[in-house]
Amino acid sequence: AQSVTQLDSQVPVFEEAPVELRCNYSSSVSVYLFWYVQYPNQGLQLLLKYLSGSTLVESINGFEAEFNKSQTSFHLRKPSVHISDTAEYFCAVSHDTGKLIFGQGTTLQVKP
Amino acid sequence: DTGVSQDPRHKITKRGQNVTFRCDPISEHNRLYWYRQTLGQGPEFLTYFQNEAQLEKSRLLSDRFSAERPKGSFSTLEIQRTEQGDSAMYLCASSQIGGHEQFFGPGTRLTVL
């Protein structure tokens, strides 16, 4: 069985500071890894994904995540956050069926 | 194509009533997924279809829940004899076979009084 643990339920950070949202997963098979973002009153959007190849993946808005197989982690980072990054972030894993197993979510609150 | 759509966006019902939600996926997507999200939690998988075939159902999907995708296009999720514990956001997503990105709809928020 697969599971995902997001280690922080809330992460408050000041604007322009760096941030890391932590995600650990458990699986007995190879998985695909995702970060989804949910802005206030909006639906889930894919932020970035790891399927294979380079373990470092990047999004168009400056986020990056690194797949670490030995530590079974897929932490999300951004070197400098903006107020508009305030949202709920979900880490997820899937296998060949495509169904997503989500973590509990991390609320990123960016303060001015 | 405007993405995945869900109808209604909000539903308030009394305990014991039946409700039905509709999901229209992106037109060329073969796979359709239903998830449920309660406050402060991540979405939980309920069931998924590949074309018209329902290939997997979660144990969360009790006998009161039924989902269909009769022509491999839109899907419906029905909850019979609703309970207060059914109050949640019901999310639909679609993808192509072999495509690992799921596109989510805006969700249907169900409130059971």
Image (cartoon, coloured by chain):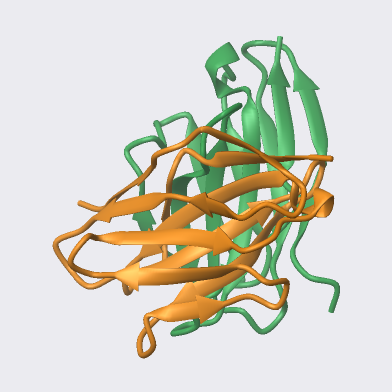
Chain colours: A orange, B green
A50 horizontally vs A31: left or right? right
- Residue B104 image point, x, y percent: 66, 60
Q: Nearer the viewer, residue B27 or B43?
A: B43
Q: Nearer the viewer, residue B34 or B42?
A: B42
How many callouts does the rendering have? Answer: 0
At x 71%, y 9%, the residue is: B113
Vertical placement of residue B103 versus B16, above or below = below
- Residue B33 image point, x, y percent: 53, 59
- Residue A10 image point, x, y percent: 57, 33
Extreme-left residue of the structure:
A28
- The answer to whether one can see residue A37 in this image is yes
Q: Quadrant of residue B63?
A: top left
Q: Quadrant of residue B60?
A: top left
- Residue B8 image point, x, y percent: 82, 42
B47 horizontally vs A4: left or right? right
Extreme-bottom residue of the structure:
A53
At x 41%, y 37%, the residue is: B61
Vertical placement of residue A87 versus A45, above or below = above
Q: Nearer the viewer, residue A25 or A68?
A: A68
Vertical placement of residue B13 versus B3, above or below = above
At x 44%, y 48%, the residue is: B45
Q: Quadrant of the C terminus of chain A?
A: top right
At x 63%, y 75%, the residue is: A59
Q: Quadrant of residue B89?
A: top right
Extreme-front residue of the structure:
A17
- The answer to whether one can see residue B53 in this image is no
